[in-house]
Image (cartoon, grey):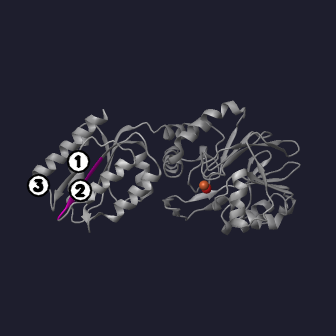
């Protein structure tokens, strides 16, 4: 028997048969600095069941891991909890290879999967409260619309008390370890918060609703098995707590000062502003947008009480890097922020005003007027930026 591409045991009757994508760095605009995994699970019951698949390019790896436990042709049921292609790309090939008697997804999942793979895809819809007997155990389904896509749902296998939570409660983290309790907690905390900020923040109220509803669903959960990152068998409250705290978006006494700069003027203003904030005991992160990826910036935005963005004017516009970041952040709908727009200009000075308009469109309160300097800040200008930091800190309270 070959030793590579083997399954890993999750519980008595559940196996991990997914793929680790060590080198992916661009996940639809999110910089996955530590790679990711596409977790798929094989349930060995009277009805052999596969829960989720992976990106299409990993199909051979999935089939090999399944084959290390059971002949793939013995799979009776495939469950698609989420139809985004990182979990469904390999589905058509898996169906062709295993010829299951049944494939199920949510109502929206059926529509999405048929849109991807053809209207003749044989697939049945399940909804919240529906169950599927696998013989000794039962799978039940809960619709989690918009976590992450309209089709998303989670499944629960009562025999081993495993919650297959798809994107929810996951993180982008490739690791040789299957379990969260084998990984540095600070890495888990950062990557889970980064994942939430960049994937789910726009649906934060729905995440709170889901977490609130879990006890009422009567699911006795021993293992949380998301589709990305490590699985949880201990301290389940840790990942639930990270998600809840991220979803609540309570602002910390923290500021993000993010800028782009042409000849250094905006950078000098940013640093004077940061010193004013620091003088009031605010924890500050300062970054040039050409140094930090938009997804790292969004991670800092997620728990900052103050978000300050600065850019010079170029060709009557803000710098393109700033437009990129603000467009991205706006779509993720951050809440409970105080904002500040600033910059430098030589001729016309639209850049910082455009930033202020974007912050306004996000519903970010701006207690201080836009501030810009012409060409280079004078010592008086830098003093004024320091004082803006002091004022913003006071406005944060
Ligand atoms: Fe991991 Fe929304 O897909």
Q: Residue at x 10, y 49 (%)?
A: 380
Q: Which residue is mark 3?
A: 378
Number of the label disc, if any, that sits on residue 116 = none
Q: Which residue is mark 2?
A: 343
Distance Cα–Cα, label 1 vs label 2: 11 Å
Give the x, y percent position of residue 10: 73, 48
Q: Is residue 160 visible?
A: yes
Number of the label disc, if any, that sits on residue 273 = 1
Please identify the quarter of the rendering in which residue 22 is found: bottom right
Secondary structure under badge 3?
A: loop
Q: Is residue 131 rendered to the left or right of residue 373? A: right
Of badges 2 and 3, nearer the viewer stands 2
Image quarter of the C terminus: top left
Q: Quick check: marks 2 and 3 in contact, CB under 8 Å? A: no
Q: Is residue 45 rendered to the left or right of residue 366? A: right
Q: Is mark 3 within 8 Å of ligand 1?
A: no
Q: Residue at x 68, y 61 (%)?
A: 54
Give the x, y percent position of residue 38: 64, 57
Figure quadrant, ligand 1: bottom right
Image quarter of the N terminus: bottom right
Q: Residue at x 43, y 53 (%)?
A: 329
Distance Cα–Cα, label 3 vs label 1: 14 Å
Magenta: main secondary structure equals strand
Q: Is residue 387 magenta?
A: no
The front one of 339 and 120 is 120
Against 238, residue 329 (above or below) is below
Secondary structure under badge 1?
A: helix
The span shown in magenta is 340-346
């Amino acid at each position: 028997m070959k030793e590579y591409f083997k399954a890993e045991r999750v519980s008595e009757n559940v196996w991990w048969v997914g793929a680790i994508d060590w080198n992916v760095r661009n996940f639809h605009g999110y910089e996955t600095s530590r790679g990711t995994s596409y977790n798929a699970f094989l349930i060995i019951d009277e009805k052999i069941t596969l829960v989720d698949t992976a990106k299409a390019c990993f199909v051979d790896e999935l089939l090999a891991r399944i084959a290390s436990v059971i002949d793939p042709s013995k799979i009776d049921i495939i469950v698609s909890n989420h139809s985004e292609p990182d979990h469904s790309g390999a589905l058509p090939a898996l169906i062709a290879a295993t010829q299951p008697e049944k494939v199920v997804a949510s109502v929206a999942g059926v529509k999405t999967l048929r849109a991807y793979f053809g209207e003749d895809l044989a697939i049945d819809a399940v909804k919240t409260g529906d169950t599927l007997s696998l013989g000794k155990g039962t799978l039940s389904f809960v619709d989690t619309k918009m976590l992450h896509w309209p089709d998303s749902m989670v499944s629960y296998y009562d025999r081993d008390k495993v919650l297959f939570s798809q994107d929810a409660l996951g993180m982008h983290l490739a690791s040789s370890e299957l379990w969260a309790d084998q990984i540095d907690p600070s890495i888990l905390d950062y990557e889970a918060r980064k994942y939430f900020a960049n994937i789910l923040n726009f649906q934060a109220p729905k995440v709170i609703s889901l977490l609130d509803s879990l006890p009422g669903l009567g699911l006795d959960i021993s293992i949380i098995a998301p589709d990305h990152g490590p699985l949880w068998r201990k301290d389940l409250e840790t990942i639930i707590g990270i998600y809840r705290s991220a979803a609540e978006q309570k602002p910390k006494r923290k500021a993000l000062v993010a800028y782009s700069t042409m000849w250094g003027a905006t950078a000098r203003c940013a640093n004077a502003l940061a010193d004013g904030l620091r003088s009031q005991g605010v924890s500050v992160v300062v970054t040039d947008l050409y140094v930090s990826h938009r997804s790292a910036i969004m991670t800092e935005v997620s728990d900052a009480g103050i978000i300050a963005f600065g850019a010079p004017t170029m060709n009557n516009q803000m710098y393109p890097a700033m437009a990129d970041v603000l467009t991205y952040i706006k779509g993720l709908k951050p809440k409970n922020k105080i904002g500040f727009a600033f910059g430098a200009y030589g001729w016309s000075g639209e850049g910082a005003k455009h930033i202020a308009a974007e912050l306004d469109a996000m519903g970010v309160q701006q207690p201080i007027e836009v501030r810009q300097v012409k060409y280079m800040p004078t010592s008086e200008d830098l003093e004024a930026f320091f004082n803006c930091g002091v004022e913003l800190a006071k406005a944060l309270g």
